[in-house]
Image: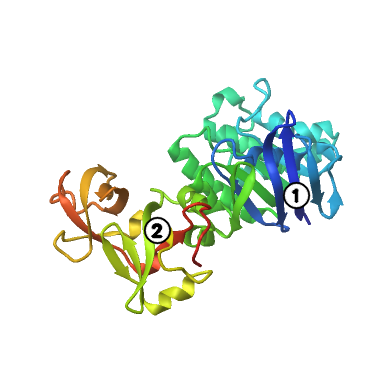
Amino acid sequence: MAEVRLEKLCKTYDKTVKAVQDFSLTISDREFVVLVGPSGCGKSTTLRMIAGLEEISSGELYIDGQLVNDVPPKERGVSMVFQNYALFPYMTVFDNIAFGLNLRKEPKAKIREKVYEAAEILNITDLLQRKPKALSGGQRQRVAIGRAIVRQPKLFLMDEPLSNLDAKLRNQMRTELIKLRQKMDSTFVYVTHDQTEAMTLGDRIVVMHEGRIMQADAPQKVYKAPANRFVAGFIGTPQMNFLRAQLIYSEATWKIRLVDKNIVLPESFLDRFLESPEPGQDVILGIRPDTIRVTSPDSDQLSGELEFFELLGSSMNLHIRIGAEKAVISTPSEGCQSYIRAGEKIGITFPLEAIHLFHPQTGTALMK
């Protein structure tokens, strides 16, 4: 069992720089948790505190119910895979994987058994007699993971292990990690700035910003019900559109005033509000690019001017201006490129159930 509990964990440098602030999270046994966020948000620092490679400034860290703040890394039952592969260039793949086992003076037969078992899981059995310089980036990363596997850790820590690989290899290695997770009984804590990795790998995503947890939830919950504007803007490509709007109550009906149009809200829409709305309340309306549809500019919907578009093969991103606001529409390119030109007026529409509303100052979500 490897439950990890972090209670108000903090890391401060030079008494002023707060890298991690009041980080509280419980990671269940065998759960795969991904810490995700922009560079400098504190995710790697948090991982290094769990590993024992970074001193904890304040707060408490428990592994299997044991307080481990002052427990040395080697006694925590943890294996860590780093961003750089950290392989010994003069050793063979076999010896690199076996390095930790040799330090523990395990029997040679047992070492051989564990190394071949890990190599088979990672599909690198035919590489065991090669040196790292004869391996591709993806193969080197497999070796680094194999070195961690053979220790049979109860807690597996990974710090951006795929960031040095090209796009094709990253996709391939993501698949390998999913398979690896299915074969192991370990708890995983994985750090990345890549939201695609976070969405595809994690049972739960922890979105971080400036050392704090913005939201910790299942991937689909984070995507469909972001807790605040930061999460909404960070998760999703292209990022969510944010438009200034106002809530209006007139003629016994609630409406959203967006640019020069009043969008009537059905009564069922009000059930999504976390608190009762106020007439005249300013809000930030969030809408994802792939939920917006292009319509005729003569329709009674919103309209905007196409500034430019990005062709991405089967899809394209339309960058439009709606009054003083800017937005992006993600739409299939088939049949669209032939009639859309920069500078043209286009109509747009979107389903009301796809709308998110945020507080203009705090950025907190106003709706479920």
> Where is residue 270, by image quadrant?
bottom left
Residue in front for this viewpoint, 11 or 285: 285
The local crowd at label 2, few if under 14, some if 14 to 19, many if 20 or more residues have their Cα within 10 Å, is: many
* Dot 1 amino acid type: Lys
Residue depicted at 83% across the width and 42% down the height = 69
**Label 2 belongs to which residue?**
285
> Where is residue 332, by image quadrant?
bottom left
Q: Position of residue 124 (x, y in %)?
A: 59, 38
In the figure, is residue 127 to the left or right of 80?
A: left
Q: Where is residue 249 in the image (x, y as percent from the top left)?
A: 37, 72
Residue depicted at 67% across the width and 50% down the height = 188
> Mark 1 or 2 closer to N-term?
1
Residue depicted at 32% across the width and 50% down the height = 327
In the figure, is residue 150 to the left or right of 141?
A: right
Is residue 203 visible from the viewing direction of this image?
no
Residue in front for this viewpoint, 105 or 210: 210
**Label 1 belongs to which residue?**
8
- Which of the image's four quarters has the N terminus? bottom right
In this rendering, is residue 119 above or below 259?
above
Q: Distance between the residues labelled 1 and 2?
A: 33 Å
The local crowd at label 1, few if under 14, some if 14 to 19, many if 20 or more residues have their Cα within 10 Å, is: some
> Where is residue 98, by image quadrant?
top right
Farthest residue, direction top: 90
In this rendering, is residue 248 above or below 63?
below
* Mark 1 residue element: strand
Residue depicted at 31% across the width and 60% down the height = 258
Q: Where is residue 122 in the image (x, y as percent from the top left)?
A: 60, 43
